[in-house]
Image (tube, grey):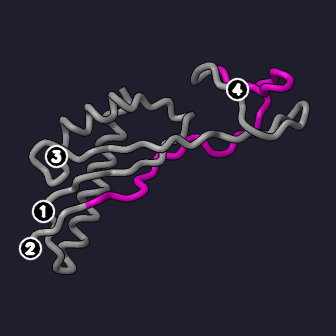
Amino acid sequence: MHELSYANAMLEAILNSIKKEEEKGKKIKKVTEINLEVGELTFINVEQLKFAFEVIAEGTVCEGAKINVEFIKPKCKCLDCGYEGEPEILDEFEVYCPKCKSIRLKLSGGKEFNIKNATVEYED
């Protein structure tokens, strides 16, 4: 379940950002929303990611934060026929050219996992 690793990385990154803000004198009460960009080729199960984050965020300022996911589609260039665009994706082991069915592809994008932004509530 690699979703737990991603959830841990998310929590660590957000808590580190909060620590930096607090060092500047800003007091954050709660993280209410987290917006992610996730590449389709990561094959992350969003429900498992949300569940893992919910469990590990318990007792932190991130507890109860809503997680929104925007998926990023991969692009490819076929090394056999020259096709450029989105590849066909059957599963994590079968990615191929939709034009000639070749697996000889140069892939770009689709493996991202970025925290786009987070919405926070500040203490009064």
Residue range corresponding to the magenta coloring: 94-119
Front: mark 2 or 1: 2
Q: Which residue is mark 3?
A: 63
Q: Is residue 92 left or right of residue 53?
A: right
Instruction: Say the numbered circle drawn on residue 88.
Output: 4
**In the rendered structure, does residue 93 fall within the stretch colored magenta?**
no
Asked whether the beta carbons under mark 1 and mark 3 sit within 8 Å of each other, the answer is no
C-alpha gap between disc 1 and disc 3: 11 Å
Spatial CA distance of label 2 from label 1 is 9 Å
Label 4 element class: strand
Q: Amino acid at mark 2?
A: Asp
Kindly report the distance in space between the C-alpha atoms of the residues bearing marks 3 and 4: 37 Å
Pick the front one: 90 or 6: 90
Whether pointer 2 and pointer 1 mark residues with C-beta atoms closer than 8 Å, the reply is no
The residue at 47%/46% (across/down) is 113
- Residue matched to label 2: 124
Residue at which label 1 appears: 29
- Label 4 and label 2: CA atoms lie apart by 51 Å
Under circle 3, the secondary element is loop
Q: Position of residue 76 (x, y in %)?
A: 74, 39
For badge 1, the amino acid type reads Lys
Closer to the eye: label 2 or 3 = 2
Q: What residue do we see at 32% from left, 58% from top?
A: 118
Q: Residue at (78%, 25%) from the top-left corner?
A: 98
